[in-house]
Image: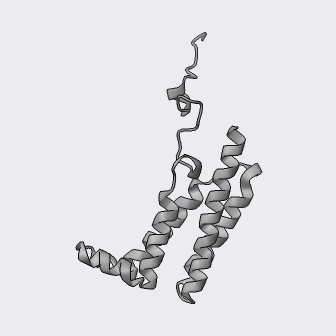
Amino acid sequence: MGEATGTGAAESGVGPRGNASSPSPASGGIWGPVGSIFAALCCLGFAPLLGALGAVGLGFVVNDVILIPLLVLFLGATIGALRHDEARRAPRVVSTLGAAVTLGGLWVSGIVVGAGLALVVASSIWNATLVRRARA
């Protein structure tokens, strides 16, 4: 009945400095945007990247059956890493729009894919800036 509930750092998911322990763009969650750019460039047939993958024995990766789900995974990781609260909803909306433009652009033009990826990366940077301001 009178037992104390654990509210320490380990139980609450908060790191030793009081920061949330989940990855975010402000704390190094960069793999979503980087992976999205990598997969999109492979889907578009960016020759230097395709050559490098073939040279290291990863030429089998250059297949849309592998790359499009990989792109969806990385775009989802990018959107998922953004803050979920109402005060920072705009970067999440922009990132979702950028992801949709990126995916749709695969069948339209490389310029459309580039514009979508620019939105995704810009929204990640925007979110990281908002997170840092909130912590300050």
Relative to 42, say whether 79 is above or below: above
Residue 123: tell me if it is visible.
yes
- Which residue occupies the extreme right position in the image? 87
Residue 108 occupies quadrant: bottom right
Query: Which quadrant, please, contains the N terminus?
Result: top right
- At a point 53% along the width and 84% down the height, the residue shown is 106
- Which residue occupies the extreme bottom position in the image? 108
Relative to 105, say whether 38 is above or below: above
Relative to 38, say whether 131 is above or below: above
Query: Which quadrant, please, contains the C terminus?
Result: top right
- Which residue occupies the extreme front position in the image? 48
Residue 104: tell me if it is visible.
no
Where is residue 128? Give x, y as percent. 63, 52
Where is residue 75? Give x, y as percent. 53, 66
- At a point 69% along the width and 60% down the height, the residue shown is 91
Where is residue 83? Give x, y as percent. 65, 50
Q: Is residue 76 left or right of residue 45?
A: right
Total marks placed = 0
- At a point 44% along the width and 73% down the height, the residue shown is 39
The colour scheme is one colour
Residue sitting nearer the eye, 84 or 15: 15
Q: Is residue 131 left or right of residue 41?
A: right
- At a point 54% along the width and 26% down the height, the residue shown is 9
Residue 80 occupies quadrant: bottom right
